[in-house]
Image (cartoon, helix red, strand yellow):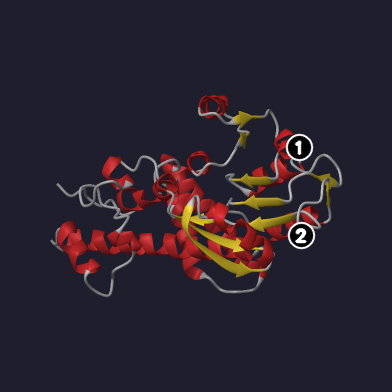
Amino acid sequence: MGSRMAKNLIKAGYRLIVHDINRDVMNMFSNMGAFTKETPAEVAEASDVVLTMLPSSSHVLDVYTGPNGLLCGGNILRPRLMIDSSTIDPQTSRNLSVAVSNCTLKEMKGNWERPTMLDAPVSGGVVAADAGTLTFMVGGSEDAYMAAKSLLLSMGKNTVYCGRAGTGSAAKVCNNVAMGVSMIGVSEALSLGQSLGISASTLTKIFNSSSARCWSSDTYNPIPGVMEGVPSSRNYDGGFASKLMAKDLKLAAKSAEDVSLKCPLTSQALDIYEGLCSNGHENEDFSCVFRHYYSGKDEI
């Protein structure tokens, strides 16, 4: 996701300084004309705005607060704005926002009195990241959101301001609950249809022209042979890994526990995806639930 977003920033004319633990990625961006740095701290020392895209809360904490992290230089920061597009728990986003806002700018620029952080996770997956059509869900200062909007629209087509720090992360967790549960529901219904003698293509046409229509049926169909250009059409390679869906559902389950809310579908979806991961399918796209949980058949 991050590399694709970075490529769109380069296309939009931004000057990039890149760090990644993958040396091949660093070399790729160096060949594209971007500058590279060995640590997040070095990126912060040379940047006005920092954008991060990482797999989990622990990675985000390490990149921001670790020994060579963005905030390791003490209370003085050069970047006036930090944007984290990772999918992490809302409390970590809130804590990092406070840590950033407690710092002082190395150099005052315009109306920026203190450095600011936005949590700005995305929806749309790898396909939208490639095409520059992501949707950003943004939490934090509204002034900072307005200042960052043109940057975000270089990588996406929609930005939604959600409110105070942590609400962008909360919105993404909720979005992925709906996405994971709906994918299971569509897969269950299509598998049932196959067992009752209805072809997947026929049932998909019915879904997409009736009340069952949703993203999991009309844009990201889980049955191999029904739709081109989606992970199910390439043996569930690429896309959004099942282990990431399990991670996000775990974040949602923890968030629900924190506010004493019953979320039985979240819990059951988490059990299903953790089971897929335990059975060796953690790197396959999450739509593989159709094949590996329901034993659904390909459309020939």
x, y percent for residue 34: 57, 31
Taking the spot 37% from the left edge, 60% from the top edge, the residue there is 183
Where disc 1 sits, the SS reads helix
Taking the spot 70% from the left edge, 55% from the top edge, the residue there is 117
Mark 1 = which residue? 45
Between tags 2 and 1, which lies in front?
2
Q: Nearer the viewer, residue 232 or 139?
A: 139
Mark 2 = which residue? 111
Q: In this view, does 285 lie above or below 119?
A: above
x, y percent for residue 152: 55, 54
Q: Which numbered dot is residue 27?
A: none
Q: Which of marks 2 and 1 is nearer the N terminus?
A: 1
The image quarter containing residue 101 is bottom right
Q: Residues within 10 Å of mark 1 (few under 14, many from 20)?
A: some
Q: Which of 255 and 120 is in front in this view?
A: 120
- Name the side, left or right, on which 140 lies relative to 298: right
- Name the side, left or right, on which 228 lies relative to 80: left
- Name the side, left or right, on which 284 lies relative to 140: left
Q: Which of 252 and 91 is in front in this view?
A: 91
x, y percent for residue 48: 70, 45
